[in-house]
Each structure stands twice: as structure tokens, then as C-alpha cells.
């Protein structure tokens, strides 16, 4: 099932507006100096956003199979970075990736298989440690199971969302809502500063930034509203809170994982961000939250 004309038109107008405003803002921030622009972290992030937007468009417009292809690619990259964070051995790396791909297959074949996915996640890590008969590897098994819950579950939610009525629109809301929420949090947090939100995990996070998270979720809903089914006020408010709050919580959760492993960035290959986990950390929490609202 491919995207409708309404979704396509709304999505392209939304992206054109967001990237247009963002480009002008970055150009103004460097005061029109092209040399400063080429060296700016904001410009690197802008270029990364352009590439990511093109990839995510394929999932939104391509139906469940397009979403499954995107989710498989993200699983391959994200499990590699996650396994490196916790120094998982080859057996656990393979088990993590295969379990995450299994979650995607379950979501594609049986969208209501949430309980099976959770059971798979809880069993794979300890099961590997048991098969290898090495008690000292129980920690690796625990981190493997956590990885399946952290990565496989949300990516399965991505696939499940795509298979629902108006699935492309809901996916677009999750993607755009998370992105705009993150950008607005960074913008308002940088401009207003103010009291710290969670200094032990992320010293840069402020309450003003959280206001930006919520404002970004509102903006995404307004921009994508024409492609969404009619929403009751309670559902509208719930989506704002869950997208804005989920974006913040997902960022903080990855900060917790990185602090536990003693690293600053999950990777280095994505300009301006670090690794793929550093970019999709908020999305990993927003996807299942949006799925819960839509299912409810």
C-alpha cells in the first residue's frame, strides 16, 4: 500500500518549508560567511538531515515493505554500534542482529505479535550465555536482551505502524515530529538556557529545551494535519506529550547507555551527530509511543 497523493503533497510541502527555514537560519547564524558555513557543525547536521530525510521518505511512501527495508538497515547499523558500546563478542553480536531482524519479520507477518517480540528479547541473551556455558558472559547476555528490547522492539513498531490504516501518515508524524522536536529543543535550549533538566546525564538539557520538544511536536502535528485522520482533542494532546516527552526521554536514555559504557558518541560516521544511535535515539522511544496512541 503506497502513500496517497494527500500525504505525498503534505509531506513534500512540510519538508520544503522546514529545510528552507533551516537553511536560511544557518546561513544567518554564520552571517553569510561561506567559509564559516562549510566548517559549521550546524551545516554538517543540516546535510545529514537532508540525507536522512531522503531515506525516511522511502519508508513513508513505500508502505510496509519500504518501512521493513528501512528498519532492517537501521537494525544492521544500530546493532553494530550498540554491540561496540558494550564490547559484545561475536556470538552476542550475531544473536542481537538476528533477534532484531526476527522482530521485524514478526511485525511484518503478524502486527499483533508484541508479546512474542518481548519474549524473544528476554530469552535471546540468557539463552546464548546458557548455550555457551560461560557464567562470566551473563552480563553480555543481559546487554544483548536489553539491546533487542531497545532496538528490535521500536524498529518492529516502525514496521507495524506502516501496516496500519494511514500508516504512512503516522510514520511521517513520528519521523518529522521527532526531528522537529529535537531541533526546537536545541534551538530554545541554546537561546534561553535556564535551569538544567538532568545535569548528571546530559548537562546541556534544560527545561527551556523541553519546552522546545513540546513546541516541535505541536508544529509537526499542525504541518502534517491534512494527511492525518481526524483526531480527538485528547489524542492530539497525547501525541504532543508523547512525541515531545519521548524525544527527550529517548535522548536521555541513550546518554545513560553511553555513560554506562564510558563513551561520548556511539559512532563517528554521521557528520554533525556521531553515529546512527546518536541520531535515532529519540525516534526509538517515539515510535512505540505513537503506535500505542494509534492502536488505542
Image: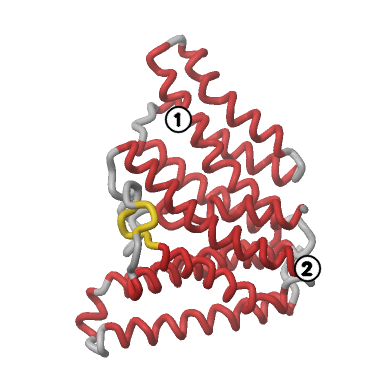
Q: Residues within 10 Å of mark 2 (few under 14, many from 20)?
A: few
Quadrant location of residue 83? top left
Q: Position of residue 38 (x, y in %)?
A: 25, 77
| SS for callout 2 | loop
| SS for callout 1 | helix
Q: Horizontal placement of 263 versus 223: left or right?
A: left
Q: Circle 2 sits on which residue? A: 232
Question: In the current view of this chain or complex, which residue is farthest to the bottom?
Answer: 32
Q: Position of residue 143 (x, y in %)?
A: 45, 30
Alpha-carbon span between mark 1 and mark 2: 40 Å
Which quarter shows the N terminus? bottom right
Q: Horizontal placement of 136 versus 61: left or right?
A: left
Q: Position of residue 236 (x, y in %)?
A: 70, 67
Q: Position of residue 42 (x, y in %)?
A: 32, 73
Residues at discs 1 and 2 in contact (Cβ within 8 Å): no
Of labels 1 and 2, earlier in sequence is 1
Figure label count: 2
Quadrant location of residue 13? bottom right
Q: Residues within 10 Å of mark 1 (few under 14, many from 20)?
A: many
Residue 1, relative to residue 78: is it above or below? below
Q: 69 or 195: which is nearer to us?
A: 195
Q: Circle 1 sits on which residue? A: 143
Q: 228 or 255: which is nearer to us?
A: 255
Amino acid at each position: 500500500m503506497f502513500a496517497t497523493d494527500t500525504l505525498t503533497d503534505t509531506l513534500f510541502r512540510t519538508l520544503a518549508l522546514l529545510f528552507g527555514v533551516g537553511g536560511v537560519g544557518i546561513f544567518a547564524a554564520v552571517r553569510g560567511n561561506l567559509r564559516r558555513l562549510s566548517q559549521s557543525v550546524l551545516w554538517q547536521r543540516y546535510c545529514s538531515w537532508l540525507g536522512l530525510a531522503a531515506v525516511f521518505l522511502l519508508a513513508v511512501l513505500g508502505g510496509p515493505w519500504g518501512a521493513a527495508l528501512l528498519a532492517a538497515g537501521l537494525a544492521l547499523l544500530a546493532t553494530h554500534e550498540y554491540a561496540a558500546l558494550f564490547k559484545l563478542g561475536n556470538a552476542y553480536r550475531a544473536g542481537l542482529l538476528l533477534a532484531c531482524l526476527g522482530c521485524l519479520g514478526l511485525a511484518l507477518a503478524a502486527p499483533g505479535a508484541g508479546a512474542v517480540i518481548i519474549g524473544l528479547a528476554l530469552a535471546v541473551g540468557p539463552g546464548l550465555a546458557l548455550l555457551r556455558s560461560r557464567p562470566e558472559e551473563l552480563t553480555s547476555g543481559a546487554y544483548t536482551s536489553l539491546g533487542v528490547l531497545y532496538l528490535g522492539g521500536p524498529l518492529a513498531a516502525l514496521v507495524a505502524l506502516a501496516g496500519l490504516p494511514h500508516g504512512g501518515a503516522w510514520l511521517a508524524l513520528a519521523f518529522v515530529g521527532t526531528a522537529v522536536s529535537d531541533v526546537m529543543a536545541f534551538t530554545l535550549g541554546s537561546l534561553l538556557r535556564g535551569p538544567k533538566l538532568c545535569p548528571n546525564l546530559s548537562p546541556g538539557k534544560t527545561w527551556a529545551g523541553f519546552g522546545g520538544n513540546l513546541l516541535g511536536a505541536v508544529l509537526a502535528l499542525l504541518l502534517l494535519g491534512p494527511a492525518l485522520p481526524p483526531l480527538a482533542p485528547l489524542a492530539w494532546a497525547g501525541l504532543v506529550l508523547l512525541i515531545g516527552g519521548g524525544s527527550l526521554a529517548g535522548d536521555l536514555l541513550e546518554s545513560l547507555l553511553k555513560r554506562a559504557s564510558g563513551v561520548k558518541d556511539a559512532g563517528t560516521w554521521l557528520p554533525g551527530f556521531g553515529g546512527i544511535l546518536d541520531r535515532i535515539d529519540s525516534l526509538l522511544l517515539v515510535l512505540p509511543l505513537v503506535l500505542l496512541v494509534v492502536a488505542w
